[in-house]
Image (cartoon, rainbow, N blue to C red):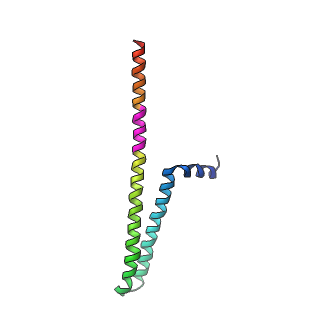
Amino acid sequence: MKTGSRVATALRDPFVASVGILVVLAVTGLVGVAVAWKGAAATLVVALQLPYLVSGAIGGLALLGFALGLLLVQTRRRREARERAELDRVVRAAADLLAAARVTR
């Protein structure tokens, strides 16, 4: 299987696509914090630092928190779906075993 084909197949999965978008958002938040840090560190005048801190640092942290929070929700949903599927398989296997035991009586 070609690498491009693997990537295309992986991107069709909604979980992978959402994780990719959330990682990009988290990196963007980190870049916002870094730009704010660099801008605020360029001067000792608080009045000139304040716009960097308000727009860059707070916005970047908000975006980072939002992205990481949604990433946590997505991973929990994926894990819970796998656990439900596994439980359904166990219940089906038990039902099949019970049905087979009734037939052999």
| Quarter placement of the C terminus | top left
Determine if the magenta segment contains residue 65. Answer: no
Q: Quadrant of residue 35?
A: bottom left
Which residues are the magenta region?
80-89
Q: Residue at x 59, y 52 (%)?
A: 7
- Give the dominant element type of the magenta stretch: helix, strand or loop: helix
Tell me if residue 46 comes above or below residue 36 in the rendering: below
Q: Quadrant of residue 50?
A: bottom left
Q: Residue at x 42, y 72 (%)?
A: 33
Residue 15 x, y percent position in the rendering: 48, 51
Tell me if residue 52 comes above or below residue 90 in the rendering: below
Tell me if residue 62 comes above or below residue 52 in the rendering: above
Closer to the camera, 5 or 44?
5
* Residue 75 shown left or right of residue 8 in the figure: left
Q: Residue at x 38, y 67 (%)?
A: 62
Q: Quadrant of residue 53?
A: bottom left
